[in-house]
Amino acid sequence: MVNWHDPVVELQCARLSLFFLHIVIGVYGWEFLVSLPFDWQHITRKRALRWTHVPYFVARYALLLAVLGGIRIANVPNPISICTQWWRFMFATGHAAVMMSSLLLAMRAIAVAESNRWVIGCLTALWLAGGATMFHAAVTIRGVYIEQYSACGVTHIGQESVNFILTAVMDIACIVIMLFALLQRKGVGLWKLLVSQGILYFIVTLIAYIPSTILIMLDLNDAMSAMLLPLTLILLVISATRMYRNLLDYVKVGPDPFSITAPSGSGRQQPERLQVGISMEIFAPDSRDADSTYAAAGDTKMTITDDLSLNGRHIQTV
């Protein structure tokens, strides 16, 4: 049986963690560059800025800072005494990106649920709880220099299990809320619904949580616990920001699909009725035609009245 706390095994795990870190840094670098035109169109005001762009931009650029911090801690040619500070910087910026990504997902769920008060309260509580645990984890994290790999390793990472569980619970709640609200709408296929509303991005995020959470809860060693954290973080941010961009590209004109309106009261306004009259004139055939089956009795006027629901005024047009 493997002794996960053996120094040789820990060094091998640390090397594998650094390998994964370089891979996910490349993945996010590619994602950031290919989606940069969307950002530039809004920065230069070619497309209208919305208030929901704030969490979107914070998520993307906070993660960019975390990636730059990851490059630094993975490449330390000379011993330094500030590995802890670098890890705290990376955790703070990375957790800020996670918080803003979760906020984007929550805002979409709230918008689909038509700003239901219970939905807002539940998701807000989960979001704040996740933010508190992430702040605590960023404070308690510790870094250590690994001379064999010229990099900064990480210790005291057990607190991350609470963060992952809370964030996963929030994403599951968002999925359940969105599915429940959307499936009430008739005439839309399930697959089209999942794609059009971005729920597939939620599912990808949840799948990414599973292996990371398992490794953290097993607590084999610090390197193994941290191995998949960057991958999960980057997948979460990519999923949330891609969902945001796709929905805004789909709804270029009209209300923001992420906007949260004021919760409506319990009383509903009775629909008003609008009467629309359509006037048609029917002329009889010429009376001089003896073989005609119609009698010449002049002009006949027929009025067809239809009722349309518009909030209680009665208007009739003839």
Image (tube, grey):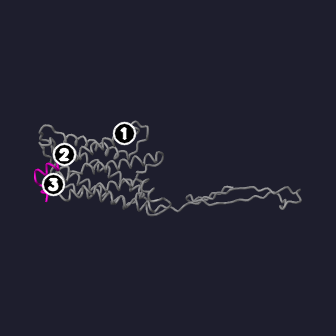
Left/right placement of residue 299 relative to residue 151 reads right
Q: Residue at x 25, y 56 (%)?
A: 211
Which numbered mark, 1 or 3, is in the foreground of this view?
3
Range covered by the magenta-colored residues: 1-14
Which residue carries the number 1 mark? 36
Q: Measure the alpha-carbon separation of dots 1 and 3.
A: 38 Å
Marker disc for residue 141 = none
Q: Secondary structure at mark 1?
A: helix
Residue 4 inside the magenta-drawn segment? yes
Q: Position of residue 114 (x, y in %)?
A: 42, 57
Q: Quadrant where the C terminus lies?
A: bottom right
Q: Position of residue 255 (x, y in %)?
A: 46, 49
- Among the two numbered marks 2 and 1 on one chain, the one whose residue lies closer to the N terminus: 1
Q: Position of residue 57 (x, y in %)?
A: 34, 43
Which residue carries the number 2 mark? 87
Vertical order, 281 against 249 (above or below): below
- Considering depth in this image, is 31 or 42 the residue closer to the camera? 31
Residue found at the very far top of the displayed protein: 44
Q: Secondary structure at mark 3?
A: loop
Vertical order, 206 against 21 (above or below): below
